Amino acid sequence: MSRPLRLGVNIDHVATIRNARGGDHPDPVRAAEIVAACGGDGITAHLREDRRHIRDEDLARIQAATSLPLNLEMAATEEMLAIALRHMPHAACIVPERREERTTEGGLDAAGQHNRLYPLVQRLGEAGIRVSLFIAPEERQIEAALRLGAPVVELHTGEYAHAAGDAAEAERARIAAMAALAAREGIEPHAGHGLTYDNVGPIAAIAELAELNIGHYLIGEAIFCGLEASVLRMRQLMDEARA
Ligand code: PXP
């Protein structure tokens, strides 16, 4: 049986546009309020080391403005751990981060970095923050998440989003198999990256997935039709795929 599929809206790129001019507009807090008002299930924000979009002070403002759960995407560093413990988001999604990348390009190597990640996952978990690991849909990464005691994995859909035809179907099947494996192991599977109106359906149809996190496309569409309309359309496509 399918579980409900939550939509977490990543509002980073509202801040990207704000920062292009160095002022206060457009304010990602206003985006968070609109997402809350139109039925989004959560707000996702990535505080990057270089603060290219979301900034430290945005986190508290977003938390004060809405009661939606905040999913903080963060690199596995002491600096980000301290910020997470200070702000106490509902969830922390640990992502790999390279300063020169345009976006989060690959999954976290949970399998290869066990010793580095273990204390971080423990400290976040002990504080009551739900830890998620942003990983490639690979068995060895799910097994590593299990050894690390992470309650959630977010499966990277970037390869799926960039593929076409048979390659996209093969990648979708891999994501579905890894979502099923995670669920069997007691880990809640989420997915995200590169999802659009055109490609969300086959991912939303994967019954074990509990949450999709979607950002760039929704904010891009919002330029043309408004944020409420873009979130509602994505929600509708997700619901149709589940039905
Ligand atoms: N999930 C994670 C872990 C991410 O790092 C990102 C991008 O910041 C997303 C989801 C959203 O990806 P997109 O902006 O391509 O929808």
Image (cartoon, helix red, strand yellow):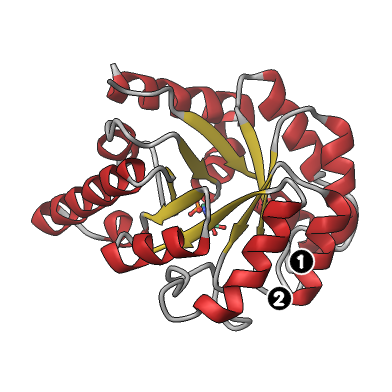
Q: Position of residue 97 (x, y in %)?
A: 59, 75
Q: Is residue 207 above or below residue 62?
A: above
- For the residue pair 41 and 21, the one nearer the viewer reads as 41
Looking at the picture, does residue 80 appear above or below residue 217? below
The alpha-carbon separation of the residues under discs 2 and 1 comes to 6 Å
Q: Amino acid type of disc 1?
A: Leu
Instruction: Please give the name of the residue rendered at 54% of the width and 72% of the height, measured from the top-left corner.
Output: 96
Q: Secondary structure at mark 1?
A: helix
Amino acid on which the number 2 mark rests in the picture: Thr
Q: Quadrant of residue 30?
A: top right
Q: Is residue 104 above or below residue 129?
A: below
Residue that badge 1 annotates: 81
Q: Does residue 74 show up?
A: no
Q: Is residue 130 left or right of residue 81?
A: left
Q: Position of residue 59 (x, y in %)?
A: 83, 50
Q: Are marks 2 and 1 in contact (CB under 8 Å)?
A: yes
Dot 2 corresponds to which residue? 77
- Mark 1 is surrounded, within 10 Å at the Cα level, by few (under 14), some (14 to 19) or many (20 or more) other residues, namely some
| Mark 2 nearby-residue class (10 Å; few <14, some 14–19, many ≥20) | few
Q: Identify the image quadrant of residue 37.
A: top right
Percent of width and height locating residue 71: 66, 46
Disc 1 residue lies near ligand 1 with CB under 8 A: no
Residue furthest to the top = 243
**Residue at point 31%, 23% (across, down):** 2
Q: Which element carries disc 2, helix, strand or loop?
A: loop
In the image, taking residue 48 as reference, residue 112 lies left or right, namely left
Q: Residue at x 31, y 68 (%)?
A: 140
